[in-house]
Every structure is written in structure tokens, then in C-alpha cells.
Amino acid sequence: MTNDRWQQLEELYNAAWKDRTVLDKADPELRREVESLLAQEKGAGFLESPALEVAAQQVAAEPGQDLILRRIGIYQILSLLGSGGMGEVYRAKDTKLKREVALKVLPDAFANDPERMARFQREAEVLAALNHPNIAQIYGVEDRALVMELVPGKTLKGPLPIDTALNYAKQIADALEAAHDKGITHRDLKPSNIMVTPEGVVKVLDFGLAAQSREHEEGETRITSPTRSGMIIGTAAYMSPEQARGETVDKRADIWAFGAVLYEMLTGKQAFRGETASDPLASVLKSEREGSPIPQSTQCRRQGCPVQAKPNRTDDSVDVRDVK
Ligand SMILES: Nc1ncnc2c1ncn2[C@@H]1O[C@H](COP(=O)(O)OP(=O)(O)O)[C@@H](O)[C@H]1O
Ligand SMILES: [Mg+2]
């Protein structure tokens, strides 16, 4: 179960505590879960609720275990690879082609959520429009699962030796350039959406928040941004100032995030961080007011370090080829 789903369950449980009629309007799956929790106990509110606590511990101990060894179409689920805001990603076996794939599964609870379903469909279409060695390839869609190339290896982590960081940075830049050439903005570039294979090949993942600009939309492959203006989307620590303000974003937002990822590859620390979720946003906006497109510290300051990596956001491309 994802954190989002867990939060929905928690909210519905609390609301149902006071007024059972809220269950009439709820998603049937969530309703069933809440009803079974309510049936297990009477008395305490959410915080003291043993039934919900036990369920929470089970969820924490075994995230996504419920699907393992089940099948989705011709795919046999083998193990959980990771999870994020959209659902869980599993390693699975394509029983027809006899190869392993990655399945990104949208939880049942989101089936009735038009925004999630639209994001899911858009991610599939965006990936299908892209064909690049540094972007995880989509093979198809099965029920509520994206069938993808299984990327071996780990998500990106810093600090890395400078040469390695620049090698990865170039591959990320190539992936972004391929997307930008198609008018696609990723909008959620961050280390957990980037994997590196044991051979050192970078794969950019998770185009679930991507948008395609109007001039690139055509016919059946039309992909539109799902978000209303004024809605903040993305991940605070990697958000450009315009994204943090909820304005319309274009590929320059990815270039900003690229700068933040590069910083993290070199230093092992997030460029914009803080105790609370809003702290990184405040520091992003502060850095903009102070006139620096990315924080000064993004330049590597280690003694003898030859790197001055500054993706130039006024330029149209992410160019790390000029890094000296
Ligand atoms: N194609 C893949 N191959 C291997 N692991 C993957 C693949 N896609 C995603 N993952 C793993 O699953 C995690 C969540 O996937 P992601 O697409 O970012 O989902 P979300 O939209 O929920 O954030 C990633 O951080 C990564 O660890
Ligand atoms: Mg992700």
C-alpha cells in the first residue's frame, strides 16, 4: 500500500468514526477496508485504534507484498522493486516471451480517481513517444500496469567521484534532451527517478508528471498536462522557482532539477533542503531572489576541483559537455 493510499484510508477511517454515512460515497475498495477495521473494534479514535495500528504495522513491514506471486495477465509478479507516489513497481516474468520486466502497478484504489488514471495513461503515452537508451523503455500496458524494461541496478546516490558524476550527468542530459526535442518536460527529475545499471548506464524513469507542449501535440498521441495552473506539482527539493510558485513550467524546470541532481551527485547532499516540506521551497525562492539560477554552492568548491558545472537556464539545452 502506498503512503497516499494509507493516508486516504486513515482519513476515511477517522471520518467514518464520526459519521458512517461518509462510507456511502467512498471508493468501494477503501470502504471495505475501513469497514473491516471498524468491525474489529469499537471505542477508540484513530490514534488509539488497535485495529488500524496493527494494519499499519503490517503495511510497513510488508509494503506491496499482497501482489507477489499473483499474475497480471501474462505477467507473473516476482518481487517488489520500489514504490513511489503512483503505486508499486514489481519485477515480473513475461510468461510468453520468457523474459523479466518491470511492472508499475496502479493500485485498485486509484481506479476511480480520474486524475490518477489520467496520469497513468499519460505516462504510458509519453514513454511510448520516447525511444532513447537513457530512458527506461515501455513495452506496453496491461490492465492497470505499465510494462517496462527491467532496469537492473540502483537509484542514483551521491557523492560520486567527479568523473563518474559527469559521466552520469551527460547521460541524464542526453535523456532530457531527447524528451525536450519531443516537447516533453519531465517535471519530477530527482535521484529516486534515475537508475544506474551495474555497467554504468543511466536510465531516467517516472514520467508520471510529464507534460507535452502544445506545438508537439498531434492526433492520437496528444498528451496534455493534467494540472491546473496554480497547482504545485513535483518534488520540493528539486523544484524550480516557477514550479514552486505553481506557474506553468517548461523544460527549464528540468534544467533546474538537473542542476540540483548534479549538485547532489557531487556532494551527496541535497542542494535545497530543510526540516519541513516547505523549507526547500523557501530556499529555492531565496536563491532566485539573490539572482543565481542555481545555488552558488552548486559549483564544486572542493580544493583542486576542476568542475564548474553550471547548467545555464537561459540556454535551451542542458549542456554538460562544456564542463571543464
Ligand atoms: N523499469 C524499472 N526497473 C527497475 N526498477 C524500477 C523501474 N521503474 C521503477 N523502478 C523502481 O521503483 C521506484 C518507483 O518507481 P517510479 O516510476 O519512480 O514510481 P512513482 O511514480 O510511484 O514514483 C523507483 O525509484 C525504482 O526504484
Ligand atoms: Mg518516482
Image (tube, rainbow, N blue to C red):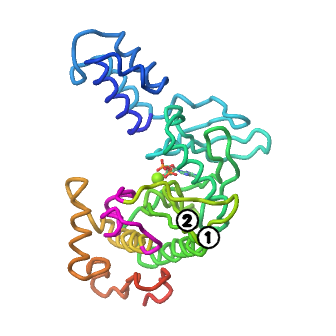
**Mark 2 secondary-structure assignment:** strand
Name which quarter of the figure residue 158 lies in.
bottom left
Residue 53 seen in the figure: no
Q: Farthest right residue?
A: 96
Percent across and percent down for residue 304 are 31, 88
The residue located at (22%, 10%) in the rendering is 43
Percent across and percent down for residue 254 are 44, 70
Report the magenta residues as a range: 230-252
Q: What residue type is labelled 1?
A: His
Total marks in image = 2
The residue located at (31%, 30%) in the rendering is 11
Residue occupied by mark 2: 212
Residue nearest the viewer, comparing 228 with 112? 228
Q: Tell whether 203 sits left or right of 284.
A: right
Quarter of the picture containing the N terminus is: top left
Q: Tell whether 86 sits left or right of 41.
A: right
- Rendered position, 268 above or below 162: above
Label 2 within 8 A of ligand 1 by Cβ: no
Q: Which amino acid does label 2 sit on?
A: Gln
Residue nearest the viewer, comparing 150 with 143? 143
**Mark 1 secondary-structure assignment:** helix
Whether residues under marks 2 and 1 lie with C-beta atoms below 8 angstroms apart, the answer is yes
Residue occupied by mark 1: 216
Percent across and percent down for residue 140 are 70, 49
Q: Tell whether 52 sits left or right of 205.
A: left
